Image: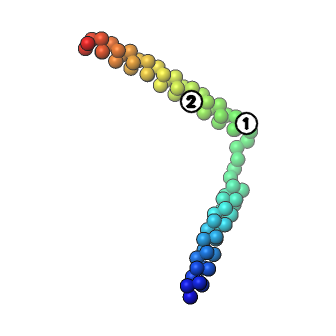
Amino acid sequence: MASVAKKTAQKNKKKPNNSFFQGVKAEMKRVIWPTRRELINYVIMVVVTTVIVMAVMGISDGVFSRIFNILRLIVG
């Protein structure tokens, strides 16, 4: 009885992995992939957004740094 349970448990362990990869394969076939032009546009948007955020963060850092330096000079 115990050996039957072990065999069933082993079969059940293999099925989820196999089922998982089959599911992934099926989902990848359903994906609507972007065209080359869309992909280029998306990459450009990400790069531009990253540069803008980086600039805002850098400017904010510089402004706050100067404010704290001025406060440090005033307070002593």
Q: Amino acid at mark 1?
A: Arg
Q: Is residue 60 above or below residue 17?
A: above
On-image quarter of the C terminus: top left
Of residue 2 and residue 42, the one placed in the foreground of this image is: 2
Provide residue 31's location: percent of width, then percent of height.
Answer: 68, 52
Q: Is residue 69 visible?
A: yes
Residue 21 is marked as none
Q: Gap between marks 1 and 2, in whole Å?
A: 20 Å
Q: Label 2: which residue?
A: 50
Could you tell which of marks 1 and 2 lies nearer the N-terminus?
1
Q: Is residue 45 above or below residue 31?
A: above
Q: Amino acid at mark 2?
A: Thr
Q: Kindly report which numbered mark, 1 or 2, lies closer to the viewer in this rendering.
A: 2
Q: Residues within 10 Å of mark 2 (few under 14, many from 20)?
A: few
For label 2, the SS is helix
Q: Residues within 10 Å of mark 1 (few under 14, many from 20)?
A: few
Q: Is residue 30 visible?
A: no
Asked if the residues shown at circle 1 and circle 2 are in contact, with their CB atoms under 8 angstroms apart, the answer is no
Provide residue 68's location: percent of width, then percent of height.
Answer: 34, 18
Of residue 58 and residue 34, the one placed in the foreground of this image is: 58
Residue located at (63% from left, 65% from top): 17
Residue 37 is marked as 1
For label 1, the SS is helix
